[in-house]
Amino acid sequence: MKKQYDFRSGRRGAVLRAPSGKTRITIRIDDDVLQWFRDEVHRAGGGSYQTLINDTLRSAVGSAARTLEDALRRVLREELPRYRATSKTSSARR
């Protein structure tokens, strides 16, 4: 090891750039939750626990959107008939 190193041409920042479409963040996750993801990846024979977390979050977001859409469709199906206006032609014939 040298006594001194020359950092004049050094650059700050991440050593490896994040791939396009990815953002590097810092997040705090409970130890037991993180361990569960690591154990799942190990049980599956390897891989990245971060990818598993990302896939799980993506699934939850998609599921929430579907749940909201389903709820809106159900409400519209149940409530819309109450507010349907009769057409002018049918009321004129009466």
Image: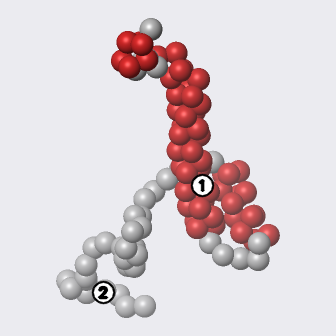
How many other residues sit within 10 Å of disc 1, few (<14), some (14-19) or many (≥20)? few
Distance of label 2 from label 1 (alpha carbons): 47 Å
Residue 81, x across and y down, in percent: 53, 20
How many other residues sit within 10 Å of disc 2, few (<14), some (14-19) or many (≥20)? few
At 63% from the left edge and 64% from the top edge, which residue is drawn?
Answer: 52
- Nearer the observer, disc 2 or disc 1? 1
Secondary structure of the residue carrying tag 2 is loop
Q: Earlier in the sequence, mark 2 or mark 1?
A: 2
Secondary structure of the residue carrying tag 1 is helix
As shown in the figure, which amino acid type bears the numbered disc 1? Ser
**62 is higher (above) or lower (below) than 71:** below
Residue 1, x across and y down, in percent: 43, 91
Residue 36, x across and y down, in percent: 73, 57
Q: Which mark is residue 5?
A: 2
Q: Quadrant of residue 15?
A: bottom left
At 27% from the left edge and 73% from the top edge, which residue is drawn?
Answer: 12
What residue is shown with label 1? 59
At 58% from the left edge and 65% from the top edge, which residue is drawn?
Answer: 50
As shown in the figure, which amino acid type bears the numbered disc 2? Tyr
Q: Is residue 85 left or right of residue 37?
A: left
Residue 84, x across and y down, in percent: 46, 19
* Numbered label tally: 2
Outermost residue, left direction?
Answer: 8
